[in-house]
Image (cartoon, rainbow, N blue to C red):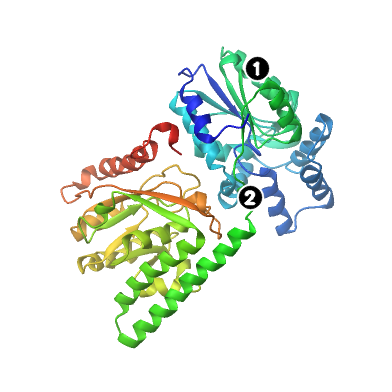
Amino acid sequence: MTYTMDEAVAAIMAAPQGPEVCAFFDFDGTLIDSYSATAYFTDRVRSGEADWREIAGMLKLLMHGELSDEEFKQVISNGVLDWAGRTETDMQTLWTRLFKEKISDWLFPEAWRLVQAHKRRGHTIVIASSATPYQAAPLAAEMGIKHLLCTQPMIRNGKLTGGIVGEPLWGEGKANAVKKFAKAHKISLKACYAYANGNEDVPFLKTVGHATAVNAKEALTHVAGERGWPQLRFERRSKTSLSAVARTVGAYGAMAASFVIGLGYAKATGKTRRAVDMISAVGSDWGLAVAGIEVEVQGEHNLWAQRPAVFLLNHQSKLDFFVMMYITRRGFTGVAKKEAANTPGFGPFMRMADMVFIDRANVAHAREALSPVVEKIKAGLCLCIAPEGTRSCSPRIGLFKKGAFHIARQAGVPVVPVVIRNAAEMMSRNGQSFRPGKVQVAVLPPIDVQGWKLSEMDEKVAEVRQLFVDTLDRWPGETFGAQR
């Protein structure tokens, strides 16, 4: 039986609470779309490091799909063999980079919802994967998952030997690891949950009382039907549809047209700020409409209650830029990394909008560059800024930097939290294409920062960050079962 996400989350919320209930998640194909090894493989191909044996092994894994336990053991053994001589720090650094550059874009938003639902019930969350811990650890850290059951590379004298410890967690190997974990933690598997997509995961899913087939392959679909397991289907993340590509081209074209019109108006009248406001409002209207993206705003009156102000947003993707133009409409400036100044089309627009470009690698330069922003705000412009400092790899709110709050204090204006819930579902962290859908925004009441003492700045900033966390956790007007 096929479940909707709301039905799946509602079932979790009706389950018993407590850490004695476990939720085991497969990694490749369940938490993320595609094999994590694909990111490593393509990285090596691009750098010219991959040899014919490695290419053949990956093609077999991707094209064959159905590997026996012995065949998979050979594939994983060949992969780990290539890492012989590397330190664990080397591997952690490599896979952290690959996660930020590629794998994070493949995270299923639906899987995030499932994990968050289990967390709300106080369940113990475990990633159970045939991959190595280096591959799964960055996502586990991002999702706040402490337990990893993975194929373990052999370590000797601080370096990988090229071998593995015991059996790979594939097929019966994964099922055995789950049983061992449950025994060690005195957990009854009958009360536990498991999520997986592969045919080889049938033994793993059979170990628990509540199994769910996610994006199931053919044989698993058949077994799930026979055993009455719920089935979930997630929207693909690693591939972009032709319609999405066409919409993206159209959206950028619409925004480019608004820029050309606005630039012509600025040159004809000399009214650069009015031209910027026109481009912001019209360009975002046209572009988002063509892209098929709707923006739903709660608390819209807070955008206008006190201006100028410093608008704080959580940063998930490039789409945030268009969302902020759409909702603020006029009279704003922003902060961007220095590389953005050279972006075709958008670079000139940002310069017209008096945006500040900073070198994030140079802290002293960043502070110096932000100094003129105070004067821009005092002159009447609002500032849109992401206190996280960079795009997040997931819906999780990162740590807030204090710069935006210092600017608001010096300019004598409030900060206004703008919580964006799901922009990354329409455009991934590193993506360039738009997906149609609805971006949800909650604008919270302005916060007066003038009375904040410097000695309590860290505490106050943490409180504002917690407002973002709480809003995402309990979205206005919704029960948890409907949340993302």
Q: Amino acid at mark 2?
A: Ser
Q: Return the x and y of residue 364 as percentages of the image width and height.
A: 36, 61
Residue type at numbered disc 1:
Lys
User: What residue did someone put label 2 on?
Assistant: 238
Q: Mark 1 or 2 closer to N-term?
A: 1
Residue 328 position, x and y percent, is 32, 61
- At 29% from the left and 81% from the top, the residue drawn is 271
Residue in the foreground of this view, choosing between 77 and 278: 278
Classify 399 as above or below 264: above
Instruction: Count neighbours of disc 1 (C-alpha within 10 A) and say few if under 14, some if 14 to 19, many if 20 or more.
Output: few
Q: Residue at x 58, y 13 (%)?
A: 188
Secondary structure under the numbered disc 1 in the rendered image: helix
Task: Report the mark closest to the observer, 1 or 2.
Answer: 2
In this rendering, is residue 459 above or below 43?
A: above
Measured Cα–Cα span from mark 1 to mark 2 = 33 Å
Residue 335 visible in the picture: yes
Query: In this figure, which residue is indicated by the disc labeled 1?
Result: 180
Along the viewing direction, whichever of 232 and 40 lies nearer the viewer = 232
The structure residue drawn at horizontal position 22% and vertical position 42%, both measured from the top left corner, is 456
As rendered, which of 410 and 119 lies closer to the eye? 119
Q: Residue furthest bottom?
A: 268
Q: Nearer the viewer, residue 45 or 234?
A: 234
Looking at the image, residue 261 sits to the left or right of residue 20; the answer is: left
Q: Residue furthest front?
A: 1
- Residue shown at the point (50%, 39%) measured from the top left: 142
